[in-house]
Image: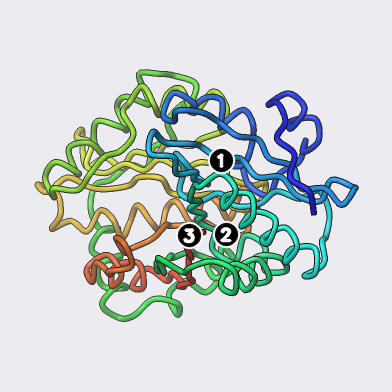
Amino acid sequence: MQIIETSAEEYGALFACYPHVYNSVSFSELNKRKTERLHYLTFRNPKVRFGLILGEDNGGTLASPFSAPFGGFTYNKAQSIEFIDDAIKALKEYVRERNMRIRITLPPFFYDDRHLPCVANALYREARLCKMDINYHFLISDFAGYPAVIGRNARNKLRQAMDQDTAFIIADSSNEDDIRRAYGIIKKNREEHGYPLRMTCEDVIGTTHVIPADFFILRHGDEDMAAAQVFHVTDKIYQVIYWGDLRDFSSLRPMNLLAYRIFEYYRKQGIDILDIGPSTEDSTPNYGLCSFKESIGCRSSLKLSFEI
């Protein structure tokens, strides 16, 4: 397997389809200011089998992703485990010759349960497993029997929330004022809990130009009390990037209701999975987040990171 670095234009032409939007040229180019240099690698034998977009930092480390929840390989059609092995071995030789390192974070397996386990296996044999994060997702098909999916305590909290004077608002994702309104709620939530907020509001607005996005706001009376931001990562899998409520309204259980309304909305939209994201930081679980996501009916999976 030969690795040939190419231009963004050629790479985009070779891989017009991609397994998720974070592997697209448009998303990578939007965020290229966050890296010293972008590398568009193609893997050939002699046909083009795989692609990999890497961001280089000033210490000589290459990363996929360099500014996203996950990255990994792109392929236009099904590839054999033999070709996957050859590609990983070629990548290992590529970085050895350049005295560099590569970090790769794969998507959770539900993004591609055919190829991702094979890629993870090949990386486990040729690289070092450095992180194993717990990622949560909600199967939209589970919403049909939602009361049975969640526990009694969660059902009681949802019932309490539904008894309040609330309104579920689908914001206009093409309207910057609506985006800023939703972002402001999330920003305050992060400040109240001491959580990091890695995207600025301008980052969010810019990203909506290359990734379709949805924004939701939950109101109590005439006050906003919770919000969510969701990216359309594939045709059938969307991802919660941020969501949160305001501390003053926590007794009203707004997150239980917000999750319910979002699941209900996407069931009508016909998607398959809502990726809720990880509840670990460098593999260490946040017990509260894990418990909440499990309580609203989410399933867990692994998101693996490797270093070569």
- The amino acid type found where label 2 is placed reads Ile
In the displayed orientation, state which residue is furthest to the top.
176
Instruction: Name the secondary structure under disc 3.
Output: strand
Q: Residue at x 36, y 73 (%)?
A: 294
- The amino acid type found where label 3 is placed reads Glu
Q: Residue at x 32, y 47 (%)?
A: 243
Q: How many marks?
A: 3
Q: How is the image coloured?
A: rainbow
Q: Position of residue 193 (x, y in %)?
A: 13, 50
Give the CA separation, mark 1 to mark 3.
Answer: 13 Å
In the displayed orientation, state which residue is furthest to the right.
46
Comparing labels 2 and 3, the label whose residue is closer to the camera: 3
Q: Identify the residue under disc 3.
A: 307
Q: Position of residue 122 (x, y in %)?
A: 64, 70
Label annotation for residue 113: none
Q: Is residue 193 left or right of residue 59?
A: left
Give the CA separation, mark 2 to mark 3.
Answer: 28 Å
Q: Residues within 10 Å of mark 1 (few under 14, many from 20)?
A: many
Q: Which label's residue is closer to the chain start, 2 or 1? A: 1
Q: Identify the residue under disc 1.
A: 54
- The amino acid type found where label 1 is placed reads Leu
Q: Is residue 186 left or right of residue 172?
A: left
Is the residue 83 above or below the residue 96 in the image?
below
Is the residue 32 above or below the residue 91 in the image?
above
**Along the viewing direction, whichever of 68 and 251 lies nearer the viewer:** 68
Comparing labels 2 and 1, the label whose residue is closer to the camera: 1
Q: Identify the residue under disc 2.
A: 273
Q: Is residue 151 left or right of residue 115?
A: left
Q: Which label's residue is closer to the chain start, 1 or 3? A: 1
Q: Which label's residue is closer to the chain start, 2 or 3? A: 2
Q: Position of residue 9 (x, y in %)?
A: 73, 23
Q: Residue at x 27, y 69 (%)?
A: 284
